[in-house]
C-alpha cells in the first residue's frame, strides 16, 4: 500500500503537540461493492507515536475509525529539534510512518 502521511509537531507551553493525517481506506468489511460482493475489512490496528525512538502514545484502533484518520496528541518532554515519528500497522500487515522534527 502506498503510505503517505502528513505530520507536524510543535511546542506549545510545556507540551509538544503532534498532528498527523494518515492515508488509509479504513474499510469495515460491512460494505458491498456494486456487484453485491463484500469489500474485505482493511483498517489500522496499531498506532504508535515515538519521541526520539521512545513510545509516548500507543493506540489500538478498529474498523470504527473513519477513512484517512487524523491523530492529535500532546506530550511533555519534547524540545525543539527532537524527532517525532508516527507509525501504524493495519490488519493486512501493511504499515506506514511519518516523521518530523519539533518546531
Image (cartoon, rainbow, N blue to C red):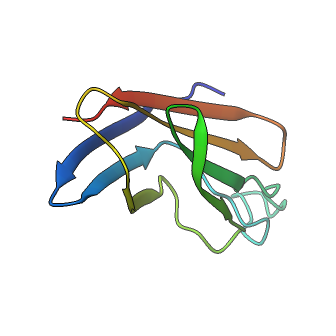
| Residue at the spot 33% in from the left edge and 51% down from the top edge | 19
Report the number of numbered marks: 0
Q: Position of residue 94 (x, y in %)?
A: 76, 34
| Residue at the spot 21% in from the left edge and 45% down from the top edge | 10
Q: Is residue 92 shown left or right of residue 65? A: right
| Residue at the spot 47% in from the left edge and 52% down from the top edge | 68
| Residue at the spot 22% in from the left edge and 33% down from the top edge | 80
Instruction: Give the camera-side residue of 64 and 48.
Output: 48
Q: Position of residue 87 (x, y in %)?
A: 60, 39
Instruction: Give the camera-side residue of 38 and 76.
Output: 76
Q: Is residue 35 shown left or right of residue 24? A: right
Q: Is residue 37 above or below residue 6?
A: below
Q: Is residue 6 shown left or right of residue 24? A: left
Quadrant assignment, res 57: bottom right
Instruction: Give the camera-side residue of 63 and 101.
Output: 101
Instruction: Give the camera-side residue of 30 and 3.
Output: 3
Position of the N terminus, as image quadrant, is top right
Q: Is residue 58 shown left or right of residue 50? A: right
Quadrant assignment, res 9: top left
Q: Position of residue 56 (x, y in %)?
A: 55, 53
Position of the C terminus, as image quadrant, is top left
Amino acid at each position: 500500500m502506498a503510505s503517505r502521511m502528513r505530520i507536524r509537531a510543535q511546542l506549545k507551553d510545556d507540551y509538544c503537540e503532534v498532528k498527523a493525517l494518515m492515508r488509509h481506506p479504513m474499510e469495515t468489511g460491512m460494505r458491498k461493492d456494486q456487484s453485491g460482493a463484500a469489500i474485505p475489512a482493511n483498517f489500522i490496528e496499531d498506532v504508535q507515536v515515538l519521541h526520539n525512538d521512545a513510545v509516548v502514545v500507543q493506540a489500538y484502533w478498529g474498523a470504527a475509525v473513519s477513512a484517512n484518520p487524523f491523530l492529535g496528541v500532546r506530550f511533555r518532554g519534547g524540545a525543539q529539534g527532537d524527532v517525532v515519528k508516527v507509525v501504524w500497522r493495519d490488519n493486512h500487515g501493511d504499515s506506514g510512518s511519518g516523521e518530523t522534527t519539533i518546531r
